[in-house]
Amino acid sequence: MSLFICPVCKKNLKKQNNCYKCEKNHSFDISKDGYVNLLLSNSKNSTLPGDNKLMVNSRKEFLDKGYYSILSRSINETVYKHIDKENYNAILDTGCGEGYYTCALNQYLEGKNLNFNVFGIDISKFALSKAGRRNKDIEFAVASIFDIPAREESCNVVLNIFAPFKEEEYQRIIKKDGLLILVIPGENHLWELKSAIYETPYKNQHKDYEINGFSFIDKVIAQSNITLTDHNDMENLFKMTPYYYKTSKTDQEKLNNLEKLETKIEFEILVYKKR
Ligand SMILES: C[S@@+](CC[C@H](N)C(=O)[O-])C[C@H]1O[C@@H](n2cnc3c(N)ncnc32)[C@H](O)[C@@H]1O
Ligand SMILES: [Zn+2]
């Protein structure tokens, strides 16, 4: 049985050869790239929601060079540290993008002799066509975090890595004692990149860590320094940040004058247990 439910009638979906079907015979084809579209056209806010092709391509190119591998390793180890090792685990990566962290986690857990399945959702079909091609064993669906196609209390582990957050949906889909793992940028993340561009850079601010219905049980900081000498990598990194689209052309051009960029990367992995 898949974790996914039918977006029309909310019944369970069964994966058959090239499609998913519910008992009412609503049917959703699996694309040639290996993902299913569970986003109904009337629930989209724009024709092509989520990250566009350019954003997806720059992120994939940058991540595949391994600059953030320390984060991927820390996520894998944190999930393994807290996961229920005795029972089956349905693991869902929400806002999984092009699946860099999702696929690395799946591969890592495969080496650990656990009983689990990994699923991913994202609202961008460009992202999922990359994710689906990375790994055919993971089930990927186009869907929104604001209306996750999973039953009440059906997930054991849910990840949200730099993606939008909707508290009620996470409360709904995670089982009692299940885990919610949030990844957010740390205070000093990309400090030198910001300093190279802005006269008065700001540190990332954090509000409080409370989430209703969950206990905050662990916080892991993953940090390192990376050195970029290729302008294409610098630009890809900058495009992955929320500031890229708010920065003037003149400020953006400051990056082109750098011979190399050495910058801190810092991430917080926050672990919550459903009460
Ligand atoms: C900053 S990216 C992070 C992607 C991936 N988790 C990573 O770290 O590589 C945010 C992702 O959230 C997706 N997204 C935006 N709004 C969404 C929504 N309402 N539901 C699901 N995904 C959404 C975007 O398409 C994008 O892939
Ligand atoms: Zn149905």
Image (cartoon, rainbow, N blue to C red):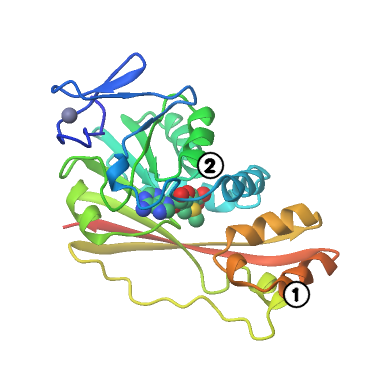
Q: Where residue 202 sits in the image (x, y, percent)? A: 57, 81
Secondary structure beneath disc 2? helix
Real-space CA distance between mark 2 and mark 1, rounded to the nearest whole angstrom: 32 Å
Count the labels in the image.
2
Residue drawn at 29 percent across, 62 percent down: 217
Residue drawn at 73 percent across, 53 percent down: 233
210 sits to left or right of 241: left
Marking on residue 99 = none
In the image, what residue type sits under mark 1?
A: Thr
In which of the image's four quarters is ligand 2 placed? top left
Q: Can the viewer see residue 160?
A: no
Secondary structure beneath disc 1? helix
In the image, what residue type sits under mark 2?
A: Tyr
Residue drawn at 57 percent across, 44 percent down: 53
Marking on residue 250 = 1
Q: Where residue 131 sits in the image (x, y, percent)? A: 50, 35
Q: Report the quarter where the N terminus lies.
A: top left
Q: Residues within 10 Å of mark 2 (few under 14, many from 20)?
A: some
Q: Is residue 198 above or below residue 146?
A: below
Marking on residue 100 = 2
Tell whether circle 2 marks a residue whose Cβ is less than 8 angstroms from ligand 1: yes
Q: Can the viewer see residue 46?
A: yes
Q: Report the quarter where the C terminus lies.
A: bottom left
State which quadrant residue 218 falls in: bottom left
Q: Earlier in the sequence, mark 2 or mark 1?
A: 2
106 sits to left or right of 260: left
Residue drawn at 74 percent across, 65 percent down: 262
Q: Where residue 29 sits in the image (x, y, percent)? A: 35, 23
